[in-house]
Image: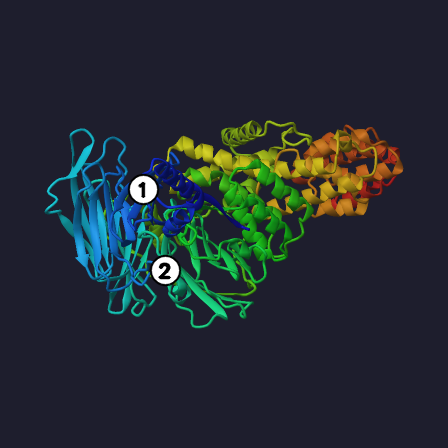
Amino acid sequence: MALRLVADFDLGKDVLPWLRAQRAVSEASGAGSGGADVLENDYESLRVLNVERNGNIIYTYKDDKGNVVFGLYDCQTRQNELLYTFEKDLQVFSCSVNSERTLLAASLVQSTKEGKRNELQPGSKCLTLLVEIHPVNNVKVLKAVDSYIWVQFLYPHIESHPLPENHLLLISEEKYIEQFRIHVAQEDGNRVVIKNSGHLPRDRIAEDFVWAQWDMSEQRLYYIDLKKSRSILKCIQFYAHESYNLMFEVPLDISLSNSGFKLVNFGCDYQDRDKFSKHLTLCVFTNHTGSLCVCYSPKCASWEQITYSVFYIHKGHSKTFTTSLENVGSHVTKGITFLNLDYYVAVYLPGHFFHLLNVQHPDLICHNLFLTGNNEMIDMLPHCPLQSLSGSLVLDCCSGKLYRALLSQSSLLQLLQNTCLDCEKMAALHCALYCGQGAQLLEGQIIQWISENVSACHSFDLIQEFIIASSYWSVYSETSNMDKLLPHSSVLTWNTEIPGITLVTEDIALPLMKVLSFKGYWEKLNSNLEYVKYAKPHFHYNNSVVRREWHNLISEEKTGKRRSAAYVRNILDNAVKVISNLEARNLGPRLTPLLQEEDSHQRLLMGLMVSELKDHFLRHLQGVEKKKIEQMVLDYISKLLYLICHIVETNWRKHNLHSWVLHFNSRGSAAEFAVFHIMTRILEATNSLFLPLPPGFHTLHTILGVQCLPLHNLLHCIDSGVLLLTETAVIRLMKDLDNTEKNEKLKFSIIVRLPPLIGQKICRLWDHPMSSNIISRNHVMRLLQNYKKQGCGCNVNIKDCLLMETAAKYRAAMYPGVLTLLCSWGCPYELRQANEM
């Protein structure tokens, strides 16, 4: 399954054995009564009530006398503790304990009669009580009403000593929320009592709302009120001190007027369990990057199609997904479950579909994973309703199990390997890289698969996508704005439909922030909103400037008019830093001769990319240290090169190639051709994005090309730019090959395609009449160029030219191209006549 649930807590394993042991000790001492059957019947009422911010779990059950017992499971020590016992036959539906475990708040109703199982009944007398746990056990009635009241203690982050004041939220079914401020005092050692219990100060936090959600981890209250039939989402942030702020307001294009009253994450929701699928689902998810998503599933009129919407508030748009259910005959008894997975939101309908929605990059549908129909991975999650708590915690209220939801790397890799759809390959690749950020084992597995399936995708370049995405994740965590500055994908548009999914995208109103200063999450959210308002066009880095400057430098090199040496030296110094950073990253032995030669052109490209990317970050990362930016740039470019080296090395090992492959003493094998093919695909991927290659790449590529390709194919690859002739490769070619007729033809074909500066050097290394002819011809060409530039009146030593050309002509068995060349230049008649002698 793409998602796996790791059990953090289980009532049956973490609580029940302890309760049985406690009962056994009690009965052994004569304090209790009843047999094993009575014992089991007592614990049928055992269930989870609440999960607090610190992870502690409050549960309840009824003993053999019908008393209500409250217990607490400490997630740190893995120990249980009995908090309190009500010696009355009451039904608890909401409970919370303060962080010091000195105060207990609970809402209870009278149990049903006629011997039925305890259930909540509207209209029952509801008591909301505040209890001093240690050691006095005083009880104060906070509310005694005919409507339900939910309770929740606030948990401020306090590192030193506890605050002398506890804050308790009361949420009423009559659509108001109050905050009680409870002062406590410590007396006689550990005795904690409530001060002024007769009058507890309280504040009205919100009223006239129809929906509310509690974020226990971040201590935030989200609620929706209706203004002129518009649903307005608001958020209140609670702080460690006494203050709280209304952070924002944003209208949502949803209708809640007839939806009734709904609470999310105020304890465990046991109401309407059998009618779960008939009610709407609405929840708010955030993560540390400053994202804010509202997930909404309306009441279903028909089970043939399921529709849900996700409001990406931080992106300024919403997406409405409609999916067709294949197995309509199987009645849908459960509703949609939304789960918060940080970078993703999971949308799950048991037995029918499982969707992973990319929260940070929702623009292209191909970055979302849609598993529908008879996919065997769909039925591996529990079919009962799951309650998504803060972070990745998931509570199964029916079984009393608390899970931690994690994305499964192995399942995503399996999906990547087995799926036939390009969109699923794209989504699985990105999701797997997110799960294993920087994991070399995962990258190695993906590279192994890419090497065997390099042509498997038709909608995008698999190598290109892997390099860009993996490099992005290597520096993603360095700053919260990285998703705005670096591309995470090579795909800019996606027009291919996703089978079974219909998508509608709409712009939405941005939140109206109600505060002036921001910290933490709110600062990141505000930064995202500012980006949506003003970032047009996008700030994503691209190599267009690098491409233009690199071509300028290469042109200057050919003409000999290069700009200042200091400028070029600085660029090459940048490349040295990248290579050093890359060498430090790769400590293992290297089989291929990469990074072992100068390759000035690739070093220029590296250095230019460092300069341009650093300037790009400095422009848009205000407040980040320059040294940190420089290191991020080096890490990013080093990662690009490392991945290219890794792909080549993986294929080199896979085909069991050795160093003798680099000599021109035999024709290329199938293994060598396979490596040549993958290197050609790497070259195509990097050329379109204009990314640097590790020095030595072109040399190795050319050597393999000479060995694997027929001459006419080899020359075509050289002329079309697929193979780039390097000085190192040509020198080795000239030295390793003898002067047979076939090799002479190859050498000559290579030499005439070399740049002039390299060609002159290589000709002097080839002891052959043809090379002497070329040397002489080049000398004559230079003399004639000077003759033409200076005019006919200049003093040109024609005799020297004729002697050199004639000598070379006869040594090379009369090279026929010289006369044509001279005539085309308009040389003096006497020089042409002498050449024809």
Q: How is this picture coloured?
A: rainbow
Left or right of 274? Residue 266 is left
Amino acid under disc 2: Leu
Structural distance between the alpha carbons of marks 1 and 2:
25 Å
- Residue 442 locus on image (x, y percent): 58, 40
Name the residue: 28% across, 41% down: 83
Name the residue: 50% across, 39% down: 474
- Residue 400 locus on image (x, y percent): 41, 49
* Residue 655 sits above or below residue 302 on the image: above
User: Regarding mark 2 in the picture, which secondary structure is present there?
Assistant: strand
Left or right of 322? Residue 213 is left
- The one nearer the camera, 393 or 431, is 393
- Residue 391 locus on image (x, y percent): 39, 46
Q: Could you classify mark 1 by the number of other residues whose Cα lies within 10 Å: few (under 14), some (14-19), or many (20 or more)?
A: few
Amino acid under disc 1: Gly
Left or right of 111? Residue 356 is right
Left or right of 459? Residue 656 is right
- The one nearer the camera, 626 or 145, is 145
Of the numbered discs 1 and 2, the one sitting upstream in the chain is 2
Residue 556 in view in this figure = no
Q: Say which mark, if any, is on residue 405.
A: none
- Residue 732 locus on image (x, y percent): 76, 30
Residue, far bottom: 301
* Residue position for label 2: 282
Asked if labels 2 and 1 touch by Cβ distance under 8 angstroms, the answer is no
Q: Quadrant of residue 126?
A: bottom left
Q: Say which mark, if any, is on residue 520.
A: 1
- The one nearer the camera, 266 or 508, is 266
Q: Could you classify mark 2 by the number of other residues whose Cα lies within 10 Å: few (under 14), some (14-19), or many (20 or more)?
A: many
Q: Quadrant of residue 113?
A: bottom left
User: Regarding mark 1 in the picture, which secondary structure is present there?
Assistant: loop
